[in-house]
Structures are given as structure tokens and as C-alpha cells.
Amino acid sequence: MTMDPRQLNGIALAYMGDAVYDVYVRQHLLEQRGLTKPAQLQRVAKNFVSAKAQAALIDGMEQQSVLSDDEWDMYKHGRNAKSYTHAKNTDVVTYRISTGFEALFGSLHLAGREDRVRELAQWCIDYVEQGGTGHGQIK
């Protein structure tokens, strides 16, 4: 089933995108990293899914021209959405950038663009694994 993501607000898109991206990260950690203990999984996963990591991923995507103009619009739709909450462990700007990141994934997923979701998720995983988010190479 596909739906027009332009009909949803950026926060709703981020809600969906958070779950979509998280599945790719969790699958990667189970398959590629061989991690099985929940505490280990959570500790390593935050290198991929924290607001700070997602903001760094957006920066990397911009530097490497990864996103199309339409995808930047999807990101901005989420980034500019009015939210009445923010993450406990980050500043408002970083939180808004991460909301845009998640809205991008939510938009693509709801539009039925699973090929692109998979491609971007893999780019993100590779970028984090190579130390692109500033955490150093993930061990």
C-alpha cells in the first residue's frame, strides 16, 4: 500500500521514518555485527539512530550529494514541522534535523519507494561504520 506523504505533517512522517530506519539498523546489527545481548545492541544502535548521529548523516548526505531535490524537500518538510517536544539529550536544532532525517525515510516508505529506502539505509550504515558521524569506526 502506498499513500501520498505530502498529505501528512512532518511529525507523522518522522514517526513512521523512525521505525523504518530502525528496522534496517537492527537487522544490520543482528546480521553483520553478530550482537545478541540487548544492552550491547542498544549501545551500538545509538551510533546509528541518535539525533546527533542522524544530524551527522544529513550533513554527510549533503557533502556527498546523496539526495535528490525532491528528497531534500521531504527532509525539509520534517525539519520545519512544528513539534512541541524535543529529545532530552540534544539541542533543538539537532532534534529538528533528526526529525527531518526520519521524515525523509517515512516519506519514501509511504510513497512505496522501498528501493530508495534500502539504498539510503545502507548508505547510512556504511557511513556510520566508517566513522563518518564522528564516533570513529564502529567496533
Image (tube, grey):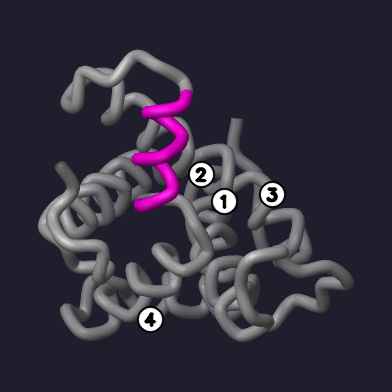
Please state if 23 lies on the left or on the right of 91 as rendered: left
User: Upstream in the sequence, badge 4 or badge 2?
Assistant: 4
Q: Residue at x 39, y 16 (%)?
A: 37
Circle 3 crowding by C-alpha within 10 Å: few under 14, some 14–19, many from 20: some
Residue nearer the viewer, 125 or 36: 36
**Left/right of residue 80 with respect to residue 24 in the rendered view:** right
Viewer-side label of 2, 3: 3
The answer to whether marks 2 and 1 mark residues whose Cβ atoms lie closer than 8 Å is: yes
Amino acid type, mark 2: His
Q: Picture quarter containing residue 23? A: top left
| Place of residue 90 in the rendered image (x, y in percent of width and height, measured from the top left) | 61, 72
Name the residue type under label 4: Asp
Answer left or right for 28 relative to 107.
left
Image mark for residue 106: 1
Q: CA distance from mark 3 to mark 4?
A: 22 Å
- Residue span colored magenta: 39-47
Q: Which labelled disc corresponds to residue 109? A: 2
Label 3's element? helix
The residue pinned by badge 4 equals 69
Q: Which residue is mark 3?
A: 15
